[in-house]
Amino acid sequence: MNFPFVNTEKILIVGSGSSVDLLPREFFLKIPIISINWSFVYIPEENLQHINFCSDFKNHAEQIKKRGFKVPPLVLTKYDFKQVYQYQISKDLTCIASSSNSTFRAIDLAYKLNPKKIYMIGIDLQGADGQKIKELKFLKRINYDLPEIKNIFENDVKEIELAKKRMCSEGMKLINLSPCSRIPQDEKIGEIKMDETMKPNYRPEGKPKEKISEKEPKLKTFGNTDSNGAEKNVKDLEKFGNPDAFKLICKASSEEEGWMKSTKAMEVQGIGCIVQVTTQQGDNIAEALTFVPGAKIKENFLVKKSFNKKNEIIGEENELISRKLISKHES
């Protein structure tokens, strides 16, 4: 059995909870990953340091092919674990947790690979409600509000806390990144520093890195507010027509955390406005369009005056400071 990674300092375990949508795509490229069940759909194919684990199906790899997905570099099921433990990754054959579900088998496998840090995202113990998971219509849905399911989750929380303590005593850390999990959040996503060991296909043994592509795509710039800003930040920008037909009303974004929210509007003179609301987290984008009859865009300007040495006004410049939607009857 050939493992996609060994002797790594950090491993990311990816589950199917909603918090997985909070992690930028860039992060999935820069760290060895163990994905659980169908959460492999979040992992870019470029990341060759990827193990997918599923406890439900003996023929999980065949199921992945059947559904039209590319099979990850290594797919394991609970039937493979005897072979996993015979592999020379650890002298310790004991389990870090007594539970045998997919989450704990993934944690146990990561533990046996002996990293310094094991990160978890999507291990929310709230249900498999990541956006890409919900799009997989063939998956059987479970009612996570049932008392027996909630009891299982409560036991899982206790198991994970025990696993954390044992790992800590052995110089390892099990770190939960999810802000919406039953398990307490240990670190915020934006606080994690990327280092050499988290770059794609890092080989601590000194083997050369495998070439992924001639040119990796640059991440989207979130700070643009109009076409002038886009021209400065996006060197190969191509335009047709008026790229500022939709005017920005309000916006908030974070390059570091990989998210952006904005509201834009296009005024149809004398009739109303088409309003577009956009939310982006990493590669996940949600948009909504609506028409607001009788609305128009009002722009507020700050007048900047320039003076000569005699304190005489020699020029004025209007600087746009805000926009808002108002009724066409307002001034």
Image: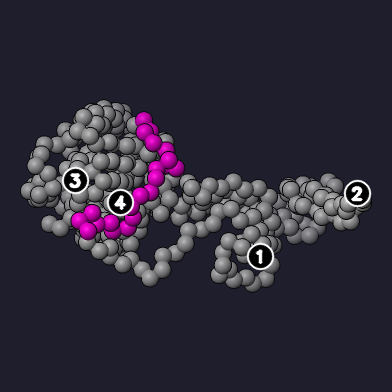
Assign a secondary structure to mark 4. Answer: helix
Q: Which residue is mark 4?
A: 197
Instruction: Name the magenta segment's main secondary structure.
Output: loop
**Of label 1 and label 4, which has the lower sequence position?**
4
Residue kind at label 1, given as amino acid type: Pro
Q: Position of residue 254 (x, y in %)?
A: 53, 47
Q: Position of residue 217 (x, y in %)?
A: 44, 64
Q: Secondary structure at mark 1?
A: loop
Can you identify the residue that label 2 sits on? 311
In whole angstroms, how far apart are the C-alphas of marks 1 and 2?
A: 40 Å
Closer to us: 233 or 283: 233
Tally of numbered discs: 4
C-alpha span from label 4 to label 3 = 15 Å
Label 3 secondary element: loop
Residue 288's disc is: none
Q: Which residues are magenta?
A: 184-206
The residue that disc 1 covers is 243
Q: Residue at x 59, y 46 (%)?
A: 252
**Numbered disc in front, either 1 or 4:** 4
154 relative to 233, above or below: above
* Picture disc at residue 113: 3
Residue at screen point 16% across, 33% down: 98
Is 14 left, or right, of 250 in this rendering? left
Colour mapping:
one colour
- Measured in 3D between alpha carbons, the distance from the residue under mark 3 to the one under mark 2, in whole angstroms, is 73 Å
Spatial CA distance of label 4 from label 2 is 60 Å
Q: Is residue 18 magenta?
A: no
Mark 1 or 3: the one toward you? 3
Q: Nearer the viewer, mark 3 or mark 2?
A: 2
Does the magenta segment cover residue 188? yes
Q: What amino acid is labelled 3 in the image?
A: Leu
